[in-house]
Amino acid sequence: MAKHMVKCFYCGEVFDASITPYVKPNSRRYAHKTCAQTAEENKTQEEKDKELLEKYIKDLFGINCISPKIKKQIETFKKDRNYSYTGIYKTLKYFFEIKGNSIEKANGGIGIVPFVYDEAYLYWRALWEARERNERVDIKEFILPVREVHIEPPQRQPMKHIRKLFTFLNEEETHEE
């Protein structure tokens, strides 16, 4: 078998990909399986949140890579408005999935985030608070007794006969006289 010598993306060591187990962190890069696992464990929460946001945006817009416009918007929101990656992710999820707004109106960007951020925050906070309250509650205590409601079938009301204003019978009676 031919040697397939590649350089590890994380440690920089050259290894034979046909023998050593490897993963591909990118489409053109190779890494030892152990190096990739170590790097994944050492990632900060912020890096994981950024990857989650980027993956969601790619899935949402149906694109392979994030455009410079969206990257610029993310960095602006992060730097100027102090938004977190998780906050931006949850805002987009709230606006497009929960509220059901159209992706076509986004014009290839995420500029709606500052306008919906506070509303989305209140939604997710209320959801979190409801879960917290419900975790401490035993559902068996709140089982309500079954109430049977009997509804009587409606009684048919007879129709009043409406007198016709014009009939041919009246005409014939007047001609006979």
Image (cartoon, rainbow, N blue to C red):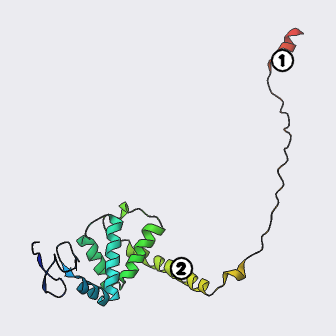
Q: Residue 169, labelled with which disc? A: 1
Counting residues from the start of the chain, the first of labels 1 and 2 encountered is 2
The amino acid marked with disc number 2 is Leu
Judged from this view, the residue extending furthest toward the top is 176
- Residue at the image point whose x is 16% and y is 75% from the top: 18
Please tell me whether mark 1 sits on a helix, a strand or a loop.
Answer: helix
Quadrant in the picture for the C terminus: top right
Q: Nearer the viewer, residue 12 or 22?
A: 22
Q: Are marks 1 and 2 in contact (CB under 8 Å)?
A: no
Other-residue count near label 2 (Cα within 10 Å), few / some / many at <14 / 14–19 / ≥20: few
Q: Where is residue 10, by image quadrant?
A: bottom left
Which residue is denoted by mark 2 in the rendering? 127
Q: Which of 176 and 112 is in front in this view?
A: 112
Can residue 93 be seen? yes
- Residue at the image point whose x is 39% and y is 81% from the top: 86
Can residue 115 be seen? no
35 sits to left or right of 165: left
- Residue 5 in percent (x, y) is at 10, 78
- Residue 49 in percent (x, y) is at 35, 82
Quadrant in the picture for the N terminus: bottom left
18 sits to left or right of 65: left
- Residue at the image point whose x is 35% and y is 84% from the top: 81
126 sits to left or right of 167: left
The amino acid marked with disc number 1 is Leu
Q: Residue 54, labelled with which disc? A: none
Q: Nearer the viewer, residue 154 or 75?
A: 154
Q: How far apart are marks 1 and 2 (CA)?
A: 74 Å
Q: Is residue 172 above or below residue 47?
A: above
Q: Is residue 111 above or below residue 155?
A: below
